[in-house]
Image (tube, rainbow, N blue to C red):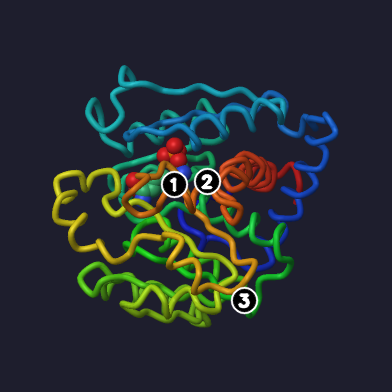
Amino acid sequence: MRHLITLADLTAIETERIFSITEDLKNKFAKGLREPLLPGRVMALLFEKQSLRTRVSFEAGMTHLGGNTMFLGNEVGFGSRESIADFGRVLGEYVDVVVVRANQHQTVVELAKHCKCSVINGLTNYTHPCQAMADLFTLRELAGPLAGRTLAWVGDANNVVRSLAMGCGRLGMRLMMATPKKYQFDAETLAWLRREVPDLDLHVTTDPVEAVRDALAIYTDVWASMGQEQEREIRLKDFAGYQVNAELLAHAQKGAVFMHCLPARRGEEVTDEVIDGPQSVVVQQAANRMHAQKGILAWLLGAKA
Ligand code: CP
Ligand code: NVA
């Protein structure tokens, strides 16, 4: 029984295996085929924060696979009515997989420790592995093998880029980050990356132009993530030079794509012109959340080894 808490939980070979299951299921889906690999299996979803993509793509994906889903709302009292350990011990008796979006990363770690079923991290303050799996799958679809290619990140060193860093390290992709000094990866994250993905080719700069120059893709995310709303005003000022706009994209190589995990704050980290422009692949990324998660579910629950 396996969990997916961070992408460090997967080897490069396992990551590639999930991508190939994803590709197969996506091709079948395009032909109207919904292979019922997980009949009778049950997924619970626990969300401490808002979600459109993660919640709906997991529910739709599990339904395509022939399984059932139950979205657990406030009334189950997750995090308030009993300990996370007791909650996990009991929930694991009923369901086969739990998708959890938590304020604190430690909540997911604790739940997984006590659940006898698989736990999937649907985003924490620290990481967002399902997002990174879908993004790397998207890049692979667009550009083929990723080893030796460059992904540029412009903005906050947040949960999404932590997971991308992990995935880049696994797949041999270089990560160029342009982030204001104060918002770069902290020592703990750097130590974690060094330990988990020692081969990661990571470059950090404060200059967005330098970061995007050789990139296959330019990725950004909101400057204030969920839970950082009180820092919004100061962050708007601190990230002022980090908007992905037409001027910045002009410094990228021809054919570079624009990526964003969504939801976006249009006019802040990205302009309408870029996110709605010909280089944007944001809808393909969002669509691939469902396909990649079907791959993750099929692999994790042993329907495809
Ligand atoms: N990208 C993403 O995880 O979106 P949601 O917050 O809507 O799930
Ligand atoms: N960094 C963002 C991602 C949302 C999908 C957040 O945590 O709010």
Indicate whether 27 appears above or below 74: below
Residue 304 position within the rendered picture, expressed as x and y whole percent measured from the top left: 76, 47
The residue singled out by tag 2 in the image is 276
Residue 108 in view of the camera: no
Indicate whether 127 appears above or below 248: above
Secondary structure state at the residue bearing disc 2: loop
Q: Nearer the viewer, residue 67 or 225?
A: 225
Q: Estimate how packed mark 2 is, as few (under 14), some (14 to 19) or many (20 or more) residues with alpha carbons within 10 Å.
A: some
The residue singled out by tag 1 in the image is 272
Q: Is residue 253 left or right of residue 66?
A: left
Q: Do the residues labelled 3 and 1 touch (CB within 8 Å)?
A: no
Q: How far apart are marks 1 and 2 (CA)?
A: 6 Å
Which amino acid, by three-letter code, is at mark 3? Arg
Q: Residue at x 61, y 52 (%)?
A: 278
Quadrant location of residue 286? top right
Q: Estimate how packed mark 3 is, as few (under 14), some (14 to 19) or many (20 or more) residues with alpha carbons within 10 Å.
A: some
Q: Is residue 201 left or right of residue 11?
A: left
Q: In this view, does 300 lie to the left or right of 115?
A: right
Q: Estimate how packed mark 1 is, as few (under 14), some (14 to 19) or many (20 or more) residues with alpha carbons within 10 Å.
A: some
- Say whether mark 3 is within 8 Å of ligand 1: no
Which amino acid, by three-letter code, is at mark 1? Asp
Q: Are marks 1 and 2 in contact (CB under 8 Å)?
A: yes
Residue 22 position within the rendered picture, expressed as x and y whole percent measured from the top left: 72, 48
Quadrant location of residue 62? top right
Secondary structure state at the residue bearing disc 1: helix
Tell me, for residue 149, which label it has, or none.
3
Q: How far apart are marks 2 and 3 (CA)?
A: 24 Å
Q: Which of 208 and 28 is in front in this view?
A: 208
User: Sequence-wise, which precedes: disc 2 or disc 3?
Assistant: 3
Which amino acid, by three-letter code, is at mark 2? Asp
Q: Distance between the residues labelled 3 and 1?
A: 27 Å
- Say whether mark 1 is within 8 Å of ligand 1: no
